[in-house]
Image (cartoon, rainbow, N blue to C red):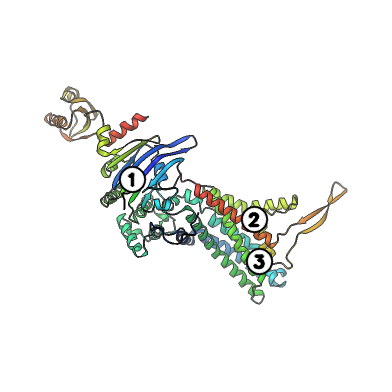
Amino acid sequence: MANPSLEAINLSKAYGSFTALSNLNLKIEGAKCVGFLGPNGAGKTTTLKIFTDLIRPSSGQALINGFNVHTHKKAALASVGTVIETPEIYPSLTPREALGMVAELRGVASSERKKRIEEVAVEVGMTDWVDKRTGKFSKGMKQRICIASALLSDPKIVILDEPTTGLDPRGMSEVRDIVKSLKKKDRLIFMSSHILSEVEDVCDEVAMIDHGKLLVYDTLQNVTARFAGGEGENVVEVALSRPLPSGVLDGQIAKLPGVLSAQRLDDRRIRIHSEGGLEAQERILSSLVGLGIGVVSFQPASSALEESYLNLIKDTL
Amino acid sequence: MIEMSDPKPSAHGIPSSLAQVMITMRYTFLDYLRSRRFTILMAIMLLISVLLTAVVSYYRPASFVSSGVLSFYSGWWGMSTTLVVVLSGIFFGGDAISGEFQNKTGYFTVPNPVRRSSIYVGKWLSAFAASSIVLLIFTAITVANEGLYYPLSIPWQFAESVLFAWFYLVAVLGFTFFFSSLFKSTSYSILVTAILFLFAFTLIETLVADLAQVEPWFILSYGSEIIGNVLQTPYPQHVTTQQGLFGAGRAAAARTFTAYNVTIPEGLAIIGIYFVITAALGLLLFERKEFN
């Protein structure tokens, strides 16, 4: 089979006078995980809904593996698993039945159906609940079943809209592991999320969107290299084991070589804005330790992706 | 629309649209059967049956127990079947499609390689099947009660009436599915269909027929009167009478008053046309409606 692909061609969506999506052009091809980022109302979910036939574009085309989702839906979605928002399941059905319905609709062979349902139930940690009716399930439990339904037919493409929404920390971690395992199986994963650490953790590429327009689409490395902070500037947070003596911050720390500014966050935490690369940071850390102020941690105040995101989104306001 | 000419699995391994209709039907039917609404509807139908059984056995009205089998069926079946059909339509069709939007079950089914029309038709068939169970039990109770007063028999007029009731059920479900597609709110769709079937149609029919003296051929409930009419011998015709109008202390001119009775072909046509139009419109709406 050819490389799995998703392509938006001049994709636009308007609701009356409000433009949710404006001439989006984006082509994602091959086995990889692409994070889809943007603020609330940026057009992320609109894009994903167009790709899954939940809404229609006002103009343009959404192609999956070369098939237009709206004119050749069955062909386009044949090898796609999706979770958009938090779907509800028919309340009187058990997960086994609901997954059975999806498996049948997707043409999973009857000889494999039972085995596949049990496999995905294990994968999302719902084996104990697979024969209980879904009507009383929590949001997180339903989300797990929906993720299971997306994986049922072992799809080549997986579209996820904020997949960890509603999940507890363990559930979030499990979903990340599922996404990582899908990557190993050479799948194309297109995933929107507000959790930047999650995207940094699992995605190879990022597409950022705001006001319905694509701001950037590139590898994670290239995006952070281009848009994170100022040229060669860093912000680190330093945690101390004891309160910082008065006068040390302005008298000594702020005057260390490479430090642009230093700020007290509370008695035991300071933020340092510095210039230079890793070597400069190493020198600053060494100097701080030398001051004997009880440094117990020294870490970036925000991730490179977060800085890139804030810089890009801020620029469009 | 469903690819009726596509019975084989597609090249992508996805079942044909017709097969997907049956898959959707099977699972949503299971959901209906286990639902509280099915239990409630069954309870209402049984309550109607118990009340009728008690009243007829206690008061033994002549029209039921001593005027012939057809008269019994006319009184029992003709009086309450349309209510059972309408309640089935409201219970199973009222939120069948709007629920896909408001309850978000559509987010589970629609983003699959399945046409929306397959989901719509599958759900319609499951609502029809669930309603049919209720109607079937009501039919059995009716026949059993007839056996208490007459030698057990099913006259051809009753068989016809049962068929008409099922045909009416088809139209009622088509109509409720249409309103269910029109709204995204389950409360609105259920409320509107309930008001239309339980009050508005009857009111409009009365106004149009009795006051305006126009045959209400455009009202579904008028078409459904064939269910009761076929149990009467002879089949009722339009009845025209002269009625005097009286003013303040003086006789005025008499006027002609017609009581309309729908004929069987007219009734079938009204029911059939309602179904075709509302089913097509409902399907079209569901195809175009957006999940946002």
Query: Of A194 and A312, which appears nearest the observer?
Result: A312
Q: Residues within 10 Å of mark 1 (few under 14, many from 20)?
A: many
Q: Amino acid at mark 2?
A: Leu
> Residue A245, image x and y in percent?
17, 27
- Foreground tag (1 vs 3): 1
Residue lying at 35% horizontally and 40% vertically, measured from the top left: A26
What residue is shown with label 3? Answer: B76
| Chain containing mark 2 | B
Eyeballing the image, is B111 above or below B59?
above
Crowding around mark 2 (Cα neighbors within 10 Å: few <14, some 14 to 19, many 20+) is many
Which quarter of the figure has residue A57?
top left
Check whether the beta carbons of the residues at disc 1 and disc 3 lie within 8 A of each other. no
Query: Which chain's residue wears label 3?
Result: B
Vertical relation: A273 (above or below) A161: above
Return the mark for residue B220.
2
Q: Secondary structure at mark 3?
A: helix
Q: Between marks 1 and 3, how big is the CA–CA gap?
A: 61 Å
Q: Residue at x 66, y 71 (%)?
A: B156
Of the residues shown, which amino acid type is indicated by label 1?
A: Phe
Tell me the SS state at disc 1. strand
Residue A302 in sight = no
Q: Could you tell me which residue is drawn at 67 percent across and 75 percent down?
A: B150
Q: CA distance from mark 3 to mark 2?
A: 21 Å
